[in-house]
Image (tube, helix red, strand yellow):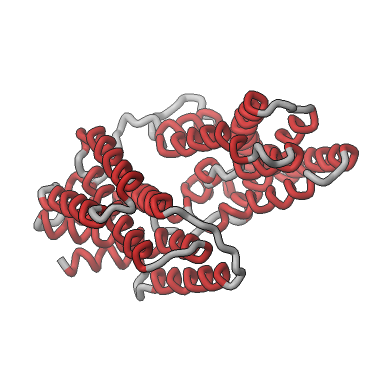
């Protein structure tokens, strides 16, 4: 069991286990930096527990679903192994990796800006551990994963209804024990992802085109489509939170938040072969980057249109300036995202989950938030000039990539 654990951990944690140490150091700096600002918000315990549980379960699921682990897993299952030792070694590595590199960062932020005690801290850690075991158990169910939805719903109800009850900790512990028993009887092959030969991602087309690639890419990554759907749902809900704010300042902030659609902005980072092809093959700058920019623009614009329609239905008062702002933010975030992917792709990641949580994904939304603050206070004439500047930047990008 120790050898299997070491084989998986060397890849995820580094040869000298430098990745967990670096992450813990970053978490300490992040916690201290936010704590000394004195900014405090009251977070209800059930919100804290549910946030930690949902985030950890999602990160664990993405770690288990990573195709980058398929090669290592294939090499391991070709050798004789004891089922129980293999399963728990693999789950232990993935669980520790998820908690140390993903959940710990979230906890650092939440605990730094909220009021908490030993009960909240222990409850959060217990919920994270329960989420890791549940995600692994549901992942091993294969054909019965729909039953996992009912299981998740039941646990969510326990968190929302019983977070302040004396039986909450025993109930979550019992649920963790149930997930553990399911993993005892799990098959090691259930965690191996086999790539289907007839998958749309590998099917050959006689006349390949970049738009066909985008379609095949999203069709073969349903979790990316789910993230886009979540952004569209967020676009419907955001007007509820911004109702008390001035529309001229709230709407640009909404556009900036909706530009945080990580999956569609990491095509080159997550596919090294594609990155090499578009950089070294002749004429690929124009063929790939321009349609890629249009593709991100359409994704952002769709979310912005949903946001504007929701605002009109709930509050009303949509103007031409707000529509122009939607085009402006969608275009600028698309241009900046393509430039980042072209000149600064993410390297050195272990699994796809690292890409989803890489700090670089916040650069474009942060820049959009700064622009949102400026746009909300500018007169119409200056705003039009900024839009013209954005169009000029897009044209310069087009000319630059043609060179």
Q: Is 30 placed left or right of 136 in the picture?
A: right
Q: Quadrant of the C terminus?
A: top right
Q: Is 254 placed left or right of 220 in the picture?
A: right
- Whole-percent x, y for residue 307 in the image: 62, 31
Q: Quadrant of the N terminus?
A: bottom left
- Whole-percent x, y for residue 239 in the image: 62, 35
Residue occupying image coordinates x 63% and y 49%: 365
Residue occupying image coordinates x 17% and y 69%: 2
Residue occupying image coordinates x 29% and y 45%: 158
Q: Is residue 65 visible?
A: yes
Residue extending furthest toward the front: 165
Residue 403 or residue 399, whichever sits in front: 399
- Whole-percent x, y for residue 177 in the image: 16, 54
Q: Is residue 67 visible?
A: no
Residue occupying image coordinates x 60% and y 56%: 344
Quadrant of the image occupied by residue 338: top right
């Amino acid at each position: 069991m120790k050898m299997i654990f070491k084989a998986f951990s060397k890849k995820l944690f580094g040869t000298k286990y430098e990745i967990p140490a670096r992450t813990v150091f970053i978490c300490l700096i992040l916690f201290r930096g936010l704590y000394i600002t004195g900014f405090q918000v009251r977070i209800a315990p059930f919100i804290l527990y549910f946030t930690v549980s949902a985030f950890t379960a999602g990160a664990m699921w993405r770690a288990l679903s990573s195709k980058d682990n398929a090669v290592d897993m294939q090499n391991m299952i070709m050798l004789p192994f004891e089922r129980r030792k293999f399963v728990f070694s693999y789950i232990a590595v993935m669980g520790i990796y998820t908690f140390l590199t993903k959940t710990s960062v979230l906890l650092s932020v939440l605990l730094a800006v909220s009021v908490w005690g030993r009960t909240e801290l222990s409850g959060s850690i217990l919920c994270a551990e329960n989420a890791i075991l549940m995600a692994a158990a549901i992942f091993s169910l294969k054909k019965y994963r729909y039953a996992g939805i009912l299981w998740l719903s039941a646990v969510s109800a326990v968190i929302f209804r019983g977070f302040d009850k004396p039986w909450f900790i025993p109930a979550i512990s019992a649920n963790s024990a149930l997930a553990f028993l399911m993993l005892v009887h799990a098959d090691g092959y259930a965690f191996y992802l086999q790539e289907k030969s007839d998958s749309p991602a590998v099917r050959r087309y006689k006349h390949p085109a970049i738009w066909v690639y985008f379609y095949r890419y999203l069709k073969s990554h349903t979790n990316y489509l789910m993230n886009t759907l979540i952004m569209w749902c967020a676009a419907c809900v955001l007007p509820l939170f911004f109702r008390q704010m001035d529309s001229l300042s709230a709407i640009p902030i909404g556009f900036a938040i909706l530009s945080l659609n990580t999956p569609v902005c990491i095509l080159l980072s997550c596919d090294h072969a594609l990155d090499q092809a578009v950089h070294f093959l002749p004429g690929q700058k124009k063929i790939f980057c321009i349609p890629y920019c249009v593709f991100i623009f359409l994704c952002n614009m769709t979310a912005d249109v949903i946001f504007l329609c929701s605002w009109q239905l709930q509050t009303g008062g949509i103007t031409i300036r707000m529509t122009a702002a939607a085009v402006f933010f969608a275009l600028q975030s698309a241009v900046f995202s393509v430039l980042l992917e072209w000149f600064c792709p993410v390297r050195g990641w272990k699994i796809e989950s690292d890409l989803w949580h890489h700090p670089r994904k916040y650069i474009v939304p942060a820049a959009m938030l700064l622009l949102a603050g400026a746009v909300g206070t500018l007169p119409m004439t200056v705003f039009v000039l900024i839009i013209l500047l954005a169009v000029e930047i897009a044209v310069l990008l087009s000319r630059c990539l043609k060179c």
